[in-house]
Amino acid sequence: MKAVVVTGASTGIGAACVDLLVEKGFLVFASVRNDADADALTARHAAAVVPLYFDVTDADAVADAVRCVEARLAGETLAGLVNNAGIVVPGPLLHLPIEDFRRQIEVNLIGQLQVIQAFAPLLGAGEARRGAPGRIVNMSSVAGRFAAPFLGAYNASKFGLEGMSDALRRELMVYGVDLILIEPGRIATPIWDKAEETDLRRFEGTPYAAPGRRMLNWLVREGRRAPGPEVVARAVLRALTAPRPPARIPVVRNRFTDYTLPSLMPARLVDWLTARRLGLVKKDSGGSQEG
């Protein structure tokens, strides 16, 4: 039985990945942070899921998880590592506390590399094991390609993950370990319930208060209308099992308008259209639209 590690497996995309991978016959090691989440997974999937207790920023807990997985593999190669764990820290960058920005990068970027480094030997990077080399699937986002106001910290983490993943994919070729990026757009998950509870009061008294509320309301409304996490799980399955998966798999409802078009438009035009929509510039103001 092929085995896969999925981080951030409690809810949303991570839980959907666990469900689909178990359905397809994988043994899934699922990272959670409390007993209730572990019990829910094992109640659903019994012995097909092995809960792992770790936060991606906790090096000791990650190392303990690696030892647990290695013991179960008994010399076999880990077929996949799905790096799904992550957080969103919203707010205008000029007023975002540095400790909040640091936490965003620590979880979404540094934590991802820490997990990859820890599990890489089990995937076949630098250690002889029985079976073909495994694959790494990094959960990025369209926010790693296109930046939005009030999501600058999250954008920074995902842009960083994109660049780090490109470098890693090329470095890992020496071991035959592949790395694939998944780039979801808006997906209907419990994250929007958390987003709705975001406290933006600390930004009152700045020019960003009203535009920030407008952006948050739009994100929550559109997020709840979006496809469910199952579409991302199918992309993850493709990344793990396709003979020659693409380096990037976008998962967006309107691929041309939400993924392709922004990269074809002049950056200054995108700036102005975005700012105008959110009320960051007066609607009758112009602006440079060069390059």
Image (tube, grey):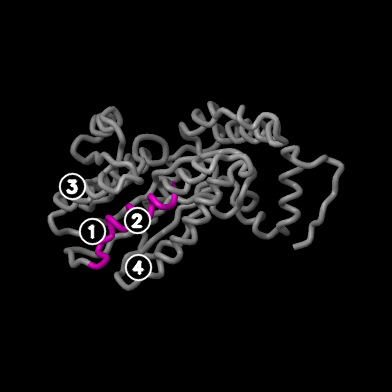
Residue that badge 4 annotates: 172
The type of residue carrying mark 2 is Leu
Among the 4 quarters of the image, the one containing residue 145: bottom right
Pointer 1 with pointer 2, Cβ within 8 A? no
Magenta range is 108-126
Q: Is residue 239 left or right of residue 196?
A: left
Q: Residue 24 carries which label?
A: none
Residue 93 picture location, percent across and down: 61, 44
Ranked by sequence position, the earlier of labels 2 and 4 is 4
Residue 47 as seen in the image, left or right of residue 244: left
Residues under labels 1 and 3: Cα distance? 11 Å
Q: Earlier in the sequence, mark 1 or mark 4?
A: 1
Residue designated by label 1: 122
Residue 220 spot, x, y in % from top left: 58, 32
The residue shown at (32%, 65%) is: 177
Name the mark on residue 68.
Answer: 3
Q: How crowded is mark 4: few (under 14 residues within 10 Å), some or many (20 or more)?
A: some
| Residue 209 percent location from the top left of the image | 68, 32
In the figure, is residue 163 to the left or right of 201?
left
How far is disc 1 from disc 2 in space, using C-alphas? 15 Å
Find residue 240 and name its label: 2
In this view of the protein, which residue sits in the foreground, 249 or 140?
140
